[in-house]
């Protein structure tokens, strides 16, 4: 039987090309956006929390210092957000998690990535 845990995936690998600066590193309310996102995920009871890293990964890691997140490196981040989503889902598949589904419309997925979405 699978444990009942719900994971969170924070996509923090992108180039932020439209913004011109890495938006994950911008401050909002005294914390960077990436730190705020990860701490909010933990506060919501998500466990584990995966953070997909790519662009400026060293700087993003530094912002998350002291948090018990799981880093997922997306070396293909420059090709778009879909590569980060794939990297996050691939990492989730290696973890013993309870039921989950990729999209609400995916009726086939009951506890693992169904591959039909």
Image: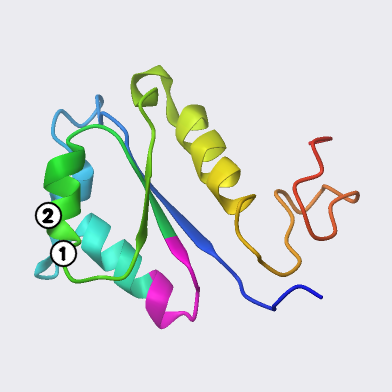
Q: In this view, does 24 lie to the left or right of 75?
A: left
Q: Which stretch did the figure color magenta?
A: 41-49
In this view of the protein, which residue sits in the foreground, 55 or 90? Answer: 90
Does residue 76 appear left or right of residue 17 in this picture?
right
Give the residue displayed 58% in from the left and 52% down from the top: 92
Colour pattern of the rendering:
rainbow
Image quadrant for the N terminus?
A: bottom right
Q: Is residue 79 magenta?
A: no
On-image quarter of the C terminus: top right
Residue drawn 20% across the image and 61% down it = 64
Q: Read off the residue under disc 2.
A: 62
- Secondary element type, mark 2: helix
Front residue of 2 and 82 = 2
Q: Name the residue under label 1.
A: 65
Q: Position of residue 46 (x, y in %)?
A: 50, 74
Q: Tag on residue 18?
A: none
């Amino acid at each position: 039987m699978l444990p009942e845990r719900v994971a969170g995936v924070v996509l923090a690998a992108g180039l932020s090309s439209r913004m011109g600066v890495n938006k994950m590193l911008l401050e909002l309310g005294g914390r960077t956006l990436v730190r705020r996102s990860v701490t909010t995920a933990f506060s919501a009871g998500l466990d584990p929390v995966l953070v997909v890293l790519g662009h400026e990964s060293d700087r993003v890691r530094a912002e998350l210092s002291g948090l018990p997140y799981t880093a997922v490196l997306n070396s293909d981040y420059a090709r778009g957000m879909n590569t980060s989503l794939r990297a996050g889902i691939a990492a989730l598949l290696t973890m013993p998690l309870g039921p989950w589904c990729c999209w609400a419309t995916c009726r086939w997925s009951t506890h693992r990535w169904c591959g039909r979405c």
